Amino acid sequence: MIWFAVGLIVIAAVAWGFRFAGQAATRQAPYFRDMPFGVAYGYILAVVALVWLVWAYVQGHSADPLVANKFFFLRIAVEGFIICATVAWLFRLAGRSIGTAWSRKMFRAMPLTAAFGILMILIYAFVAIFAPWLAPYGQEQIIPGVAANIVPGGDPALGGDPAFPFGTDQIGRDILSRLIYGAQNTVGIAFATTLLAFFLGGTFGFLAATLGGWLDQVLSRAVDVLMAIPSLIFALLLMTIASVWAPRVGIPLTVFMVLIIAVIDSTRVFRLARAVGQNIVVMDYIEAAKLRGEGMGYLVFKEILPNATAPLLAEFGLRFCFVFLTIAALSFLGVGIQPPLADWGTMVRDLGSFVNYAQFAPLAATAPLLAAGAIAMLTVAVNFVVDWMLQRSSGLKE
Amino acid sequence: MGSVLKIILQRLALGILTLLIVSVVIFGAVNLLPGDFAESILGQGATPEAVASIRRDLGLDQPLITRYFDWLGGVVQGDLGTSFAQANFASFTGTTSGATTVAAQIAPRFANTMFLAAVTAVIAVPFAIILGVLAALYRNSVFDRAANIFTLTSISSPEFFLAYILILFLAVLNPIFPSLSNIYSGMAFSERLEKSMLPALVLTLVVTAHMMRMTRAAIINLLASPYIEMARLKGLSPMRVIVRHALPNALAPIINVIAINLAYLITGVVVVEVVFVYPGIGQLFVDSVKIRDIPVVQACCLIFAAAYILLNLTADIMSILSNPRMRHPK
Amino acid sequence: MTETLLKMRGVKLEGRSDEVWTPIINGVDLTLAKGEVLGLIGESGAGKSTLGLAAMGYTRDGVRISGGSVEFDGIDLLTASAAVKRGLLGKRIAYVAQSAAASFNPAHKLIDQHVEGPVQHHVMSRAESMADGIELYAKLRLPDPESIGFRYPHQVSGGQLQRAMTAMAMSCRPDLIIFDEPTTALDVTTQIEVLAAIRDIVEQFNTAAIYITHDLAVVAQMADRIKVLLRGDEVETADTRTMLAAPTQEYTKSLWAVRSFQRPVKPSVSTGAVPVVSLQKVDAAYGKVPVLHDISFDMHEGRTVAVVGESGSGKSTAARCITGLLPPSDGQILLDGQVLPPDYRKRSKDQLRQVQMIYQMADTALNPRMSIGQIIARPVHFYLGLTGSAKRKRVHQLLEQIELEPSEYYNRLPSELSGGQKQRIGIARALAAEPKFIICDEVTSALDQLVAEGILRLLAKLQDDLKLTYMFITHDLATVRAIADEVVVMKDGHVVEQGPKDTMFKPPHDPYTELLLSSVPEMDPDWLTNLLAERGVDNIGDAALDKM
């Protein structure tokens, strides 16, 4: 604690010196002259952090396995960051030179984060669609002649097996295959749920915006009440009830989950669709169309919807992330996607304890992190793209 | 001042009404269930006498409306009913100890959760607001862009991912904090704080990210307003522009941001408590969901909803109070 | 030789859009002597506000000074340190913004914001400055100068706020004040009050000023010298009287000429002719708030009826009653002598076709996702049932009628057109229905003068060709003079006066019409002086309205 404080003070001294040197060297150039001390401090702090990161990265390659293990994850993180950035950069470069004039123009104005996001979404889609061909085993396949509970990491000394780099679960299913199938199940179910939520929320939202009156009042008040209950809590409550219903009516619990989350989430979509719709409905061109005597269908499909696609698309991305995270959380808590379907949230819970192996078997500890990271990576990717889309549309307005 | 009071009373009444309707929704949803819980608790092999006795004990033989008002009346007096799991246990042993009530089960855990939320808020709120204001002041700088990527990543990650990352770095590789938060009553404050640190940090990460982005947006919006430009053109120092001209108007949006994010904590707390085996209300909720202990689920749900509504209501009222147009009507 | 206060040389300004810096001002020189008032005029997008701020050494976000020098009283503002600049701003250079309502901090009282400058710059103590503020309020003829400062901005009207802001700018007795379109957002009767107050106080303290506006008549009253800007370049600079009497540049001449557009007077309507549209004792209300009281007037074929009034007079509401968007609570509306159903949903397709509308904001009146061809083709198809090549031919014909090259514009989106072109598309869409009657709701008020004149000429030509009847809603009396045959003056939901144009513009008038007419600035630099001498400072603006 003392060293920490001393460090901060030393940084402050260096920052002061840095600014002073800058002023002297550039003969009071306005940039250094008007530089607040906080900015100088920030620069030095960033340099210190960068130096530490390089030091830690070098430690990750240390000959001493204990030290190397300790910095293994930092090393992976740094390498992963560099690889991701490079790949995204190459992808954007490719996008700028290949494709139609429209797509090339789009890639030219795209930040690296958005390029990374698009690439990741494409990869996830590919894995999800071709999971059966990519996975070495089936998701429910209990591989004959192979022991259960093989420790991930493929290190025989710790109870691993190089043939199963991610190990096997408690009844002997290949974890790698289940990870790959997880893309299909988790992403697919989340996607379907989001579509359903949009269909429900969008339809009612636009109806409320265009028709107004008592329908708008009733729907809005109902949505207000539903939104007064935190969504994860409400989902858990309804899942409890569904878990009693499901066996009686013979419908899998997962279907109930899709319906429940779609309904809960559609309230958020409703709000947005209604707001977007109302903004468009007050436009003069809608008034002109109304005064022309146009019918409801023409108004909604020709005049309103085409102007609502941009905000709705961005919202679709955000909603998908939200649904995806909710499903993952439910599965992690044990009430989401039900076995034998392979699913990332459930896998994190089952493999979680391997994190404690990190000190002596870093590879074993990566297994739960990979499943959780797979969830995070997709939502990060979608968020990057949505962030870019929102920034672009807000920039156009100015 | 009269009109402001009227508006605030209206909001309060609306909040209470919402809470009432929510209680109906929760109660109604639970009682839509097929069959009877007495059966589902005791299983297929239960004797009719045992089922009937449990039904009587739990008041399940009453009509729905009566049961709702009984339940609501109890809730108002702090009686949240009898836990099925405990009742089941009691009916076998023939004892009725005080610990069978839901309230007795929830009370200590509720205190624990409030402790966790408080620790999180104490770290996250000042941190997020300072960072958010900095990002707004230096927008489009390297710092702002880095903060943007960092917060987006943090928001996008599921809570359990952040939790395992922190466990990995702060508990396993560098044993600074314990990875299990087995706190109990009578524990010393410092030890309690140490054990709650990791879950609090995970929640901080998530909440800070949200709060910082919202603060940044609010401040940028504010700094773009003509009266800030006017203040600068009057030759006021940057500090005075911020303190005298930006801050009084930033209060409402910032309070709003804080309230929304504390409300968000409510959801986040469930997963985090499960990861760290923290004995809070979130974990109790999840456990009860799994064993279908309906009275407990119902009570937890109501508590979460009440906290959520209360926070949003606070934000609403605070922003009314901090609006000069409201405070000084024409 | 008078002493130079501000010297700008070759100032270049750039603005950022889509990560690219594009020029806004391409090297403008500006010199201002002590106590001199310079009028800076130009159309929207000419860069006059940006230049005005640059004179203070200040740029908004996304704008930068890329060249030239700005020297204020010997101090180079572009290289001065932030602290030196802060010492000048507010103290020696002050700023009056366009929207006073947005530029006052809503959280503080007016007087607290007033004294902030003098106290922070150590010019006066708080008490001194407060007393001085009250004096300034009185000089600017604000009502209740003793107490008005203790109100919050939202408790004070727009015209009063603008004067309070001028007082605030004066609080340190600066050498220079930049007025950035201070009266643009105000009604004419309020504007004149503010203009008179600003002119007085600037004269009294011998303050130099840069007065930025797009209104020639306003600048003629306020400035000693006028500088004309066009798309970031200076067109010409001259003394106000010289410039008004003999502009040398083509562009300046064309600006002057706009006001001369006038249509020949049409013969009066024959008695007994059935009006195309007739309002008979129309009352209307938004919810429970009444907005129209007993409105009656007729509109005859081939003629233009200008409905004039300030904001809140009910002129647009009258239009909403005619279109059927707001069914009247009492009275009726006749089309060709037939009673129209009050609600547009109850009207027949043919009735809807006969009444068309052109909107003020062409931006929101055209669906941004539809091409020009689609927008115009829709009514052609909807009302007249034309399809395929016949429809296309008709759209081409309409585009030719509004003087846009069909092959070039047919496939464009509204966002690819200029403001004036968009307004023309709005006209074409109305024409496509082949109506008898068109409501023009402030169609030129969002446009620059030259463009607006083009639209007015087009509307006049179309009227002659197609025997159209216009209801022309406007607050601008110059437009009324140019295009109207009949005039209806409205105030607070009542018709104050109506009649043919030539009688309406001649006395005797109703007192309100008189006030309205006299408040419209004229190009004569002595107009304001003469008017004040004639009416007295206490008989203009709100003061005069209060007496009615």
Image: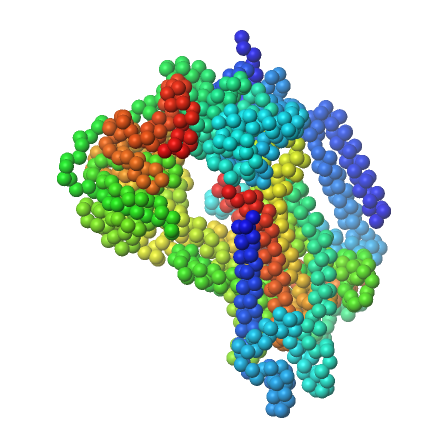
Q: Quadrant of residue B313?
A: bottom right
Q: Nearer the viewer, residue C260 or A374?
A: C260
Note whether B207 is above or below C527 in the view shown: below
What residue is at 50 percent from the left and 18 percent from the top?
A: C203
What residue is at 78 percent from the left and 33 percent from the top?
A: A16
In the rendered image, residue B224, in percent from the top left (x then y), is placed at 56, 38
What residue is at 61 percent from the left and 64 percent from the top?
A: B306
In the rendered image, residue C435, in percent from the top left (x then y), is placed at 24, 44
The reply, left or right, for residue B244 in relation to residue A222 is: right
The reply, left or right, for residue C394 in relation to residue C171 is: left
The reply, left or right, for residue C242 in relation to residue A157 is: left
Residue B24 visible in rendering: yes
In the rendered image, residue A109, in percent from the top left (x then y), is placed at 54, 42
* Scheme of image coloration: rainbow
What residue is at 30 percent from the left and 47 percent from the top?
A: C283
Q: Nearer the viewer, residue C277 or B223?
A: C277
Q: Nearer the viewer, residue A354 or B196?
A: B196
Residue A358 visible in rendering: no
